[in-house]
Amino acid sequence: MTSVLLSSLKERWWKKVVNKGLQWEGINVEIKGLTPKEAIGEPQRDDFPLLKGKEFLIQAKIKESIGQAFTAIPSKFSGCLEEINKLDELQERNRALIVATINVTYRYFGLLQDSVHCKDEGPELCAQRVLEHFTGNCKNSKIAVIGYQPAFVSTLSKHFDIRVTDMDPENIGKFKNGSLIESYELNKEIIKESDVIFMTGSTIVNGSLDELIEYSSGKEIILFGTTCAALAYEFGFKRLCFQSS
């Protein structure tokens, strides 16, 4: 199924590209997968998906600008924006290439500045800022965390009533960082019982975003991560990504 949100984002991106006359020549995009150290450095925890080889960060580059996207199916690309625009969105491999390219294009155009994943102590510092945000704005809220991010889960679980879902079968059913990691198949039920939906932006690549937005109708949605940088910019989603650059 084609994602309505991704298709809409792609249309807006392409209109910007065409308006600047950069669809065929003038901009080439280079995309590659990053090693875990390149992507996240040496964080304080060892159970980030990037370190386990469950998820990968691909990086798109236009001149000196960088945009990224998380995916389970990394691939390389080198070519013009017109070629990216023609990719089939039904394949996750292509969705990752498309999203990374849109992110780097928006960075290149100066529309956003925070499209590169944090490293080393960054996730822990971000988690503290995330806690400050929720403490100041969502007191006594039940939070659904969609996508296991260990620093966020560890920090939030000490102060809030949270439920966490993930797609990784190695995480599901286990207690990690103070919370039971539940199956993504329970997303609808858990979202219904929650006040705030704190969702990984990589849902735009794995194909679950539209469904999750539908489940979350009427509730506050907050995205996290660099994958959804352009998405948040275009559609006004709140995004917490305090240590990205």
Image: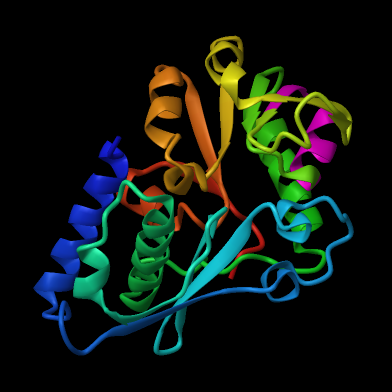
Q: Is residue 182 above or below residue 56?
A: above
Front-lying residue, 37 or 119: 37
Q: Name the foreground residue: 40 vs 140.
A: 40
The picture quadrant where one finds residue 84 is: bottom left
Question: In the rendered view, does 88 fall on the left or right side of 135?
Answer: left
Q: Quadrant of residue 87?
A: bottom left
Q: Position of residue 209 (x, y in %)?
A: 43, 36
Give the residue drawn at x 28%, y 39%: 2
> Which residue is more in the foreground, 119 or 238?
119
- Residue at x 89%, y 29% (from the top left corner): 178
Q: Where is residue 162 in the image (x, y as percent from the top left)?
A: 73, 23
Q: Which residue is drawn at 77% across and 55% down?
A: 52
Examine the rendering and report whether any part of residue 195 can be seen.
no
Q: What stretch is highlighted in magenta?
A: 151-164
- Where is 14 relative to 145, above or below? below
Q: Viewer-proximal residue, 76 or 178?
A: 76
Q: Is residue 141 a member of the stretch shown in magenta? A: no
Residue 118 seen from this side: yes
Q: Is residue 223 above or below residue 66?
A: above
Q: Quadrant of the N terminus?
A: top left
Q: Which residue lies at the image location 45% right of the left edge and 88% below the top edge?
A: 64
Location of residue 193 with respect to 1 vertically, above or below? above
Question: Is residue 49 left or right of 116 when viewed as pictured?
Answer: right
Name the colouring of the figure.
Answer: rainbow
Q: In this view, does 219 lie to the left or right of 102?
A: right
> Picture coordinates of residue 243 (x, y %)?
66, 62
* Residue 200: image location, x then y, percent: 57, 42
194 with respect to 232 (left or right): right
For the C terminus, the image quarter is: bottom right
Count of number-bearing discs: 0
